[in-house]
Amino acid sequence: MPTFDVSVVGLTILDVLGRPVSHVPERGGVTFIDEIRLTVAGPAGGTAIDAAKLGLKTRIVGATGRDEKGAFIRSVYAGLGVDTALLAVADGVPTSATILPIRANGERPALHNRGASDAFLLSEADYPAALDARFVHVGGTGLLAAFDGEPTRAFLAAAKAAGRTTTFDLIAVGPEHFDLVEPLLPLIDYFLPSIEEASELSGRKDPLEAARFFLDRGVGTVAVTLGGEGSLIASRGGEVHRLPAFEVPVVDTTGCGDAYSAGFIAALARGLDLKSAGLVATAASGLVATGLGSDAGIVSWPETVAAAGALQPKRLAA
């Protein structure tokens, strides 16, 4: 029996967020804002934080620099009980970090320093520990220079050979990344892209057509997140679920996709069906949007499940 519920592998970032930001002052001017936060984020880092909050025994696998940003990230993981035995320290490079000036409507332009995540690489000797979990989530393909491509494919192949359930997310991809992603698709049980990412890779604007594109290439289930429009879930078994987002007061959309991934995995780990998993994931994503940063809003599994039952769904467009 694996030690962990989920092993989250890939991009860990320190986010520095401020809101609301309407403009950057000229020259040496000062603008006062309401809130500034530091959070652990990224398709691996943010997902691991939220998975731990949702009650999963979680291991993070990635890299930070040997700096104050890395120390902060480790302290946050420690506070939530996230295992960091495979969170490497990369010498000579900073911890990956992003500055996010959040607009009043929740939009989030980003200034990103790639840093240590580009140096992250797993050796085969680390596979047994990295795969010591029921679910293996790879998050951050597109911004993992050393791990992207064949190293990711080999790791996912090892996960499947070990009988693990694989989940997958990416970031900052364009059509030029399809050759990087295509060999991974038959090794992915649950693919969790945004509609922007799915469209860039598939060339399909319609979420169901995009989902079918990936299903035809070997993915087991695709859950395409649609921002404020909710999500579309489709499986190779023929299930299709179009789930609306919930009505929530939006403060910041940072990390909503990572929260969706964490909620989806947490639901599957508890044996929920696809539609129920999508509803919990939608609630997790909505809760994160109500505060500043990728860890906002989510408190626990019971509160997230309660929100999935209590929040009002948005009306789907015809």
Image (cartoon, rainbow, N blue to C red):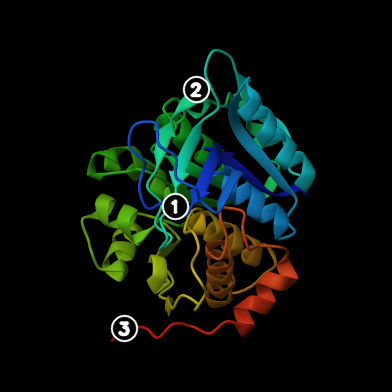
Q: Answer left or right for 142 relative to 188.
A: left
Reading the image, the residue beneath label 1 is 102
- Cα distance in 3D space between marks 1 and 2: 28 Å
Secondary structure, mark 2, is helix
Q: Answer left or right for 137 relative to 60.
A: left
Q: Nearer the observer, disc 1 or disc 2?
A: 1
Q: Residue furthest front?
A: 29
Q: Nearer the observer, disc 3 or disc 1?
A: 1
Reading the image, the residue beneath label 2 is 119
Q: Bin the neighbour count of mark 3 within 10 Å (Cα to Cα): few under 14, some 14-19, many 20 and up.
A: few
Q: Residue furthest top?
A: 92
Give amino acid for label 3: Ala
Q: Bin the neighbour count of mark 2 within 10 Å (Cα to Cα): few under 14, some 14-19, many 20 and up.
A: many
Counting residues from the start of the chain, the first of labels 3 and 1 encountered is 1
Q: How far from the left and from the top, in percent, is residue 167?
A: 52, 52
**At 61% from the left edge and 58% from the top edge, which residue is drawn?**
296
**At 55% from the left edge and 27% from the top edge, which residue is drawn?**
95
Secondary structure, mark 1, is loop
